Amino acid sequence: MTAESDAVKTVAGLMALAARTAPKAVGQDSIVCRVVTGKEQDKLAARIDAMGKALGLDFFFVNAGQVRKSDATLLIGVEGTKALGLSCGGCGFPTCADMVKAGKAAAKRKKSVYSGPNCVFKISDLGIAVGSAVKTASIHNVDNRIMFTAGIAALELGLLKGCSVAYGIPLAAAGKNPYFDVQMKH
């Protein structure tokens, strides 16, 4: 382990703190954060690979390799199927009660990568939390990239209990950012 790798893990904790303290709709916190490293991170990368194979999508393999080579990965999810109580209709249903009812019915016939429907405010909270986290990484000069693939793999592995939508943010300290300028196989 290097000093840089240790520092990245410290920054991952600061990023989780930034996500936790980011503003939330009506002050209700539904954000879940988890830092994965080592074998747990390897398991996450293996799941991304398996999903890429099942879906036939090459970018999953690239993302899996990037997660595998990272010092840590921050997972941020939201309990988006919980009703906020505003009945705004942003989720596509007239009331929060209708959204919850539709979510229970969807859960029975499932399988998609995300559970839903989701409260539009909860999803906005997730975006703000992720933005706050990557801002913190930037302040500390830690290379990072927001990944849909790492988020859905984390959900499938049960790493973010109760969450319906998630993103993963692999983190690295390297001489060159490992998350950009990558070649895709076509």
Image (tube, grey):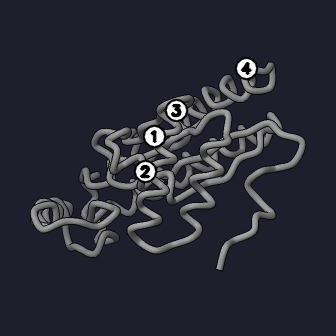
Q: Which residue is drawn at the image coordinates 33% and 62% (left, top)? A: 114
**Do the residues bearing badges 1 and 2 touch, measured as CB atoms within 8 Å?**
yes
For marks 3 and 4, give the CA distance. Answer: 15 Å
- Who comes first in sequence, dot 2 or dot 4? 4
Give the percent coordinates (x, y) of residue 182.
76, 64
Give the amino acid type for the residue marked by disc 2 in the picture: Arg
For marks 3 and 1, give the CA distance. Answer: 10 Å
Local packing at callout 2 (Cα closer than 10 Å; few below 14, some 14-19, many 20+) is many
Q: Which residue is drawn at the image coordinates 34% and 70% (left, top)? A: 90
Asked which secondary structure carries label 4, the reply is loop
Say if 54 sits above or below 161 in the image: below
**Do the residues bearing badges 3 and 1 touch, measured as CB atoms within 8 Å?**
no
* Nearer mark to the viewer, of 3 and 4: 4
For marks 2 and 4, give the CA distance. Answer: 25 Å
For marks 1 and 4, give the CA distance. Answer: 20 Å
For marks 2 and 3, give the CA distance. Answer: 14 Å
Give the amino acid type for the residue marked by disc 1 in the picture: Lys
Local packing at callout 4 (Cα closer than 10 Å; few below 14, some 14-19, many 20+) is few
- Who comes first in sequence, dot 1 or dot 4? 4
Asked which secondary structure carries label 3, the reply is strand
- In the picture, the quarter occupied by the N terminus is top right
Q: Which residue is drawn at the image coordinates 67% and 42% (left, top)? A: 69
Say if 153 sits above or below 62 in the image: above
Q: Which residue is mark 4?
A: 1
Q: Which residue is mark 2?
A: 47
Asked which secondary structure carries label 2, the reply is helix
Q: Which residue is mark 3?
A: 36
Left or right of 149 in this view: 175: right
Left or right of 186 in this view: 78: left
Q: Which residue is mark 1?
A: 43
- Who comes first in sequence, dot 3 or dot 1? 3
Give the percent coordinates (x, y) of residue 39.
50, 30
